[in-house]
Amino acid sequence: MNHFVSMKDLSAGEIQQLIKLAEQYERGQYSNLTKEGKRFVANLFYEPSTRTKMSFEVAEKKLGLEILDFHCDSSSEQKGESIYDTAKTFSSIGAEALIIRHPVDNQVQLLAEQLPVPVINAGDGKGEHPTQSLLDLYTMYKEFSYFKDLKVLMIGDILHSRVARSNALALKTLGAEVFLSCPKEWQDPNIDYPYLDLDEAIEHCDVAMLLRIQLERHQHQTNLSAQQYLARYGLTKEREQRMKSNAIIMHPAPVNRNVEIEDCLVECERSRIFKQMEYGVYTRMAVLNMLLNKGDEAVGENHQTMYAHAQQW
Ligand code: NCD
């Protein structure tokens, strides 16, 4: 693994390896990635972020890495510098990995092809968000310990969601059963899973994954009010009560309360929304380790055994 830009690049074995490493981090079994001298990484966020940026920062600090923090507004981007030149600058001055979020689809992949250091995609437009997917997978794994035939229902703005795209790819690799539910105009013909009626699907899923309405990426405004959206496509208390007894609720956040999900459900017993945020730290530590130390901290099962076990997920 040289970069972490798309879930399509990861085999089931590699996903399992990252999950196992994240588990070690959750248990507190790790040491710094910096045995001798300082090691730098750069967080280049060209789009707003709270969870992703901050949990990368916590992950980096826990691993003893020094962070080069970048602010678009006060950078040479304001003088017209290209993102390639900015990113190359960071690698030239010593950043050993670049964590990049950008509003343009595929921009991070392009940079990864051009730069001499590992690049991590922290979300590119409507493209992908692989570290969010990894923390989502970790959340499911912690709950169910398997992926094969796990029923995952993704609900909401499928067309504009990079989270949906990355999870669709990863869950296919892992053999889960994915189905989707959303307004017709937000269906994505490139995501090859069945679209079902929410009222029917909600009763059969193990995971109900809600997606934020990506207003900033919409070409046209939707005609639905928040109340209408919740009633037709959102997770209401009434729908939640018809879910399987052990089914869980997920949402990458930020949440539009009372739009995608009824306010009272955000922190209900089934909700793993804030757990997902915690897991984002361990999974991002695992990704950083894989790229900067080639997963050298993995203890217990060797990689060969992990690949063999992955087939049984
Ligand atoms: C997601 C994102 O930015 O793509 N949020 C996140 O990273 N936690 C989802 C979203 O913004 O809807």
Image (cartoon, rainbow, N blue to C red):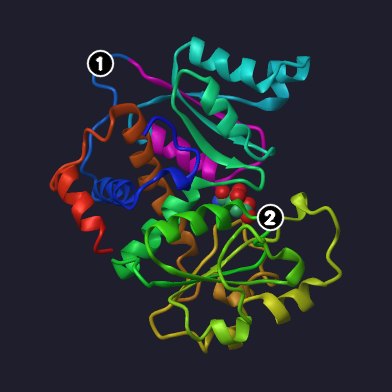
| Residue 96 sits above or below residue 303 on the image | above
Task: Using the image as rendered, state which of residue 51 and residue 192 is in the foreground.
Answer: 192
- Residue at 35 percent of width and 48 percent of height: 11
Which residue position is annotated with label 2?
Answer: 160
Please determine whether, in this image, residue 29 is positioned above or below residue 191.
Answer: above
Q: Nearer the viewer, mark 2 or mark 1?
A: 2
Give the residue drawn at x 20%, y 43%: 29
Q: In the rendered view, does 84 fall on the left or right side of 285?
A: right
Image quadrant containing the N terminus? top left
Q: Is residue 117 left or right of residue 264?
A: left
Q: Position of residue 221 (x, y in %)?
A: 85, 60
The residue stretch that appears in magenta: 38-60
Q: Dot 2, how many residues are within 10 Å of its Cα: few (below 14), some (14-19), or many (20+)?
A: many
**Disc ID at residue 36:** 1
Residue 186 is covered by the magenta coloring: no
Quarter of the rendering containing residue 303: top left
The kind of secondary structure element at disc 1 is: loop
Q: CA distance from mark 2 to mark 1?
A: 43 Å
Task: Pinpoint residue 22: horizontal percent, then vertical percent.
Answer: 31, 48
86 left or right, relative to 230: left
Residue 86, x across and y down, in percent: 62, 17
Residue 100 placement: quadrant: top right
**Dot 2 amino acid type:** His
Dot 1 amino acid type: Glu
Which residue does the image show at 30% across and 14% down from the upper left? 37
Say which label, 2 or 1, has the lower sequence index.
Answer: 1
Asked whether, in this view, residue 196 is left or right of residue 79, the answer is left
